[in-house]
Amino acid sequence: PSALMAGTLVLLTAMLARELGGGRAAQTLAAACTAVSTTTLVVFHMLTTTALDLLVWTTISLLVVRVLRTGDQRLWLAVGTVAGIGLLNKTLVVFLLAALAVGLVAVGPRRAFRSGWLSAGGAIAVVLWAPNLWWQATHGWPQVELSGAVAAGGSGTSEPRWALLPFQLLLVGPALAPIWIVGQVRLLRDPALRWARSLAVAYLFLLAVFLVTGGKPYYMSGTYPGLLAAGPPPVIAWARRRGRTLPTGAVTLGLSGAVAAVLMRPVLPAAWLSSTPIVDVNDDAGETVGRPAFAVTLAEVHDALPADERATAVVLAVNYGEAGAVERFGPALGLPAACSGHNAFWSWGPPADGSGPVIAVGLPEAALRRFFADIQPAARIDDGVGLDNEEQGRAVWLCREPFQSWEVAWPSLRRLG
């Protein structure tokens, strides 16, 4: 699914370039830049909410550009449908819609707001989004609390606020940054694209909003297909005036893609990662190493239990990544299903009351002593390659004699971040 979405993203970028007046060469360059961009290579390596979110942002951008160019107001229905589906996946789409609205108000064409089709599209989006809104409202709006934790740096991909601006040069790649920068300037200054100037204003608005609110640098990723679609025509014209050849551009694209692939894809052996800066640049590279070994360690602790305890044992993980590793690799090793108080994993509930000993991983000993009278160290996580990720070196605890039932203890184990 991720590979198919990546290919679709590349195609949509080429279509955006065509809408913005680019010929075949411009469309090809825009598509190629998207294909080898840092964001594409890292995001579409995994099936995540971000992968679908980027596709949704680009689809909305294409549809809005087509509405503005052709005047076909009926396409607002498609915009609303895509936005509604996207909002069930990730709330970030709200920021894109707000930014586009600000852009249209600031530089036009404002006639779009007089269209009944726009109102109908907005209604479709709200109706599709309604189940998510209802769940959030009836569960205390956890998304708001989670967003606050992210803004405070409580995520592996969080960065200081000042880093948001320089990071923008890395999301596509430093060598290709001039193309999207030219695209932003063209949208702002080219009289022939005045009708699409709201895209450039939307970009600046989002940059300011995420800078103020502490958004992650990659939150801007969905804006770059549009900028990459706008940039190629003047870049190609400049290159032709100076006699730059096609091989020169191909080499630039190739080198940019190769560097991004080494940093963002599992190209190098896992055993090499600890001696490279890759994990410092790409947090996910470290967090996708050692999961089978992690599950094996927990299985060894589980297998060492007496038979009667083994049948009722519980695995309690500190975060959804560790719980997910147990879900993925645990069944083949005889591990019970994992529980975790982290984010949405908490909503799936605690173990049944009367369960046996708890194999806890990642939780501090002091925190566990609030719930259990008997806590013994049972193992320590080792990924086997000496990589310092979130799991490496963590203690595995064997916990017995709970002070209270799971039903009573579970609310205090909830953690958003």
Image (tube, rainbow, N blue to C red):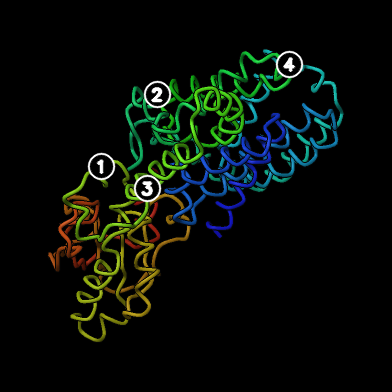
The x and y percentages for residue 256 are 39, 41
Q: CA distance from mark 2 to mark 1?
A: 18 Å
- Sequence-wise, the earlier of marks 3 and 1 is 3
Say which amino acid is labelled 4: Gly
Look at the picture and state if 387 lies above or below 310.
above
| Residue 154 rendering spot, x and y as whole percentages | 33, 38
**Which is nearer the eye, 28 or 10?**
28
| Residue marked by disc 3 | 258
Rounded to the nearest angstrom, the CA distance separating label 3 from label 1 is 18 Å
Measured Cα–Cα span from mark 4 to mark 1: 42 Å
Kindly indicate the quadrant of the structure image that contains residue 191.
Answer: top right
Q: Earlier in the sequence, mark 4 or mark 3?
A: 4
Mark 3–mark 1 CB contact (< 8 Å):
no
Dividing the picture into quarters, in which one does residue 368 lie?
A: bottom left
Provide residue 69's location: percent of width, then percent of height: 78, 27
Disc 3 secondary structure class: helix
Q: Earlier in the sequence, mark 2 or mark 4?
A: 4
Residue toward you, 19 or 208: 19
- Quadrant where the N terminus sits is bottom right
What is the CA distance from the residue labelled 3 to the residue labelled 2? 24 Å
Mark 3: give few (<14), some (14-19) or many (20+) Cα within 10 Å. some
For the C terminus, give its image quadrant. top left
Which residue matches tag 1? 280
For badge 2, the amino acid type reads Leu
Q: Residue beneath label 4, please? A: 108
Pointer 4 or 1: first along the chain: 4
Which label belongs to residue 307?
none
Whether the residues at callouts 4 and 1 have beta carbons within 8 Å, the answer is: no
Q: Is residue 365 left or right of residue 96?
A: left
Residue 366 is left or right of residue 38, and the answer is left
Per the model, the C-alpha gap separating discs 4 and 3 is 40 Å
Residue displayed at 42% across by 55% down: 346
